[in-house]
Amino acid sequence: MNTSPTAQVLAQWDDWSSNCTDRLFDLDARVATQGSADDRLDIAAVFVARKAIVDRIEAMRAAQGRDERTATALAAQPLLDEQGGLVANDLTAGATLVDAVLGRIEGHLAVTEAREGEIARSIATATADLAEAAALAESLGQQAKQVAELHDRQAATAREAVSLTALAVDAHALLVGLRAADAERTRVLAALPDVPAKLTALRTRETVVRALVDEVRTKVVPVPNLAVPAVDALGATPSVDALPWPAARAQLEPYLSRLDRVGAALDEVERRFRTALERRNDLRGLLQAYRDKADAHRLGEDPRLEPKYQAARDVLWSAPCDLEVAAPLVTAFTDAVNATIGGTSATDPMPDMSPKEDAR
């Protein structure tokens, strides 16, 4: 194995030549599709310089067997092309020049290819979004004009990343809006089959709530100033089979919204009227509990307490019961019981808050 200094130098140059050749042919193919005119001129110049370098390396290899000194001296002599033009002052300078030019082309191609990749992605994204948007616009019967305008922009847009990126953004925004409209349509149409059953349930609820309202009005005053909504006032479900979605939506959404509001209104009427009745029952329970407390202290018919108890009881067990009158009477009795017995002790029974007589 030849281990002379020249042989070691030639092995290093062979490695450089192999790497340079791989880079050069890779860049030559990329420059053909993505490079500029300057890139193509530089590639051609590198081919010339590489040949001069490879020829010098082979000359050194041929001289090595005859004279090591001559072979070494060849590395320091100027490099010339086939026409005798100067390529570089010596072999090392030639290799440095080639590496620098290849590096510059690689950097320029990296920028160009990244830009082309962005353009390709923008085109692909805009094309896919516009295709989906066009289908949704046709299905929904809306925003077809906006889709057509974006198609025209796509056809007219030059291959510029900024313009294509803006087009892709606008196309996606349009698609997002159409997807939302489609989801809304799906939701609304899915609710329609349940409308008849919902109307039946609301009518039943209306009957129950009206009965509750009538009952409460006979038992307590004042009552909430709320009217019971009439389900039949909603009318029939709109027929929209032959309508485009925008027109159908204009009829269906208000109707479904009113349907929901009627249900919520029935709930509120029931809650408010039931609360009024429960208030009367709570006052009855509290009054009776404190009467039991007085009995436990042998004060059940105490003349200081009995008139107050009877006054509250007369109002609470009247019909309709006036809650605004009853509440302070119950408070007067409970305060009097506490004052008379000096408060409950540890041995006092806990008051039973439930009414002792049936509610009327």
Image: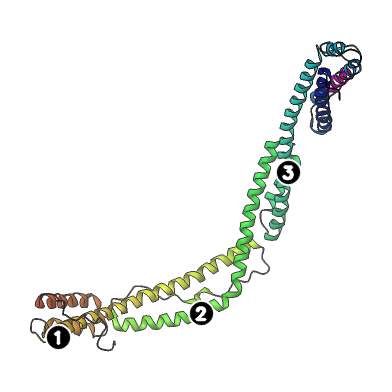
Measure the C-alpha gap from mark 2 to mark 1.
49 Å
* Membership of 52 in magenta stretch: yes
The residue under label 3 is: 123
Secondary structure category for the residue under label 1: helix
Distance CA(mark 1)–CA(mark 3): 90 Å
Q: Amino acid at mark 3?
A: Ile
Name the image colouring.
rainbow
Q: Which residue is mark 2?
A: 201
Q: Residue at x 21, y 83 (%)?
A: 288
Say the numbered circle drawn on residue 295: 1
Residue 41 point in image, percent of width and height: 83, 22
Instruction: Rate crowding at label 2 as few (under 14), some (14 to 19) or many (20 or more) other CA atoms within 10 Å.
Output: few
Quadrant housing the C terminus: bottom left
Q: Which percent across, then down, holds residue 174?
A: 64, 50
The label nearer to you, 3 versus 2, is 3
Is residue 96 shown above or below 128?
above
Label 1 vs label 3, nearer the camera:
1
Give the structural element (helix, strand or loop) at label 3: helix
The amino acid beneath tag 1 is: Asp
Position of 174 relative to 91 (above/below) = below
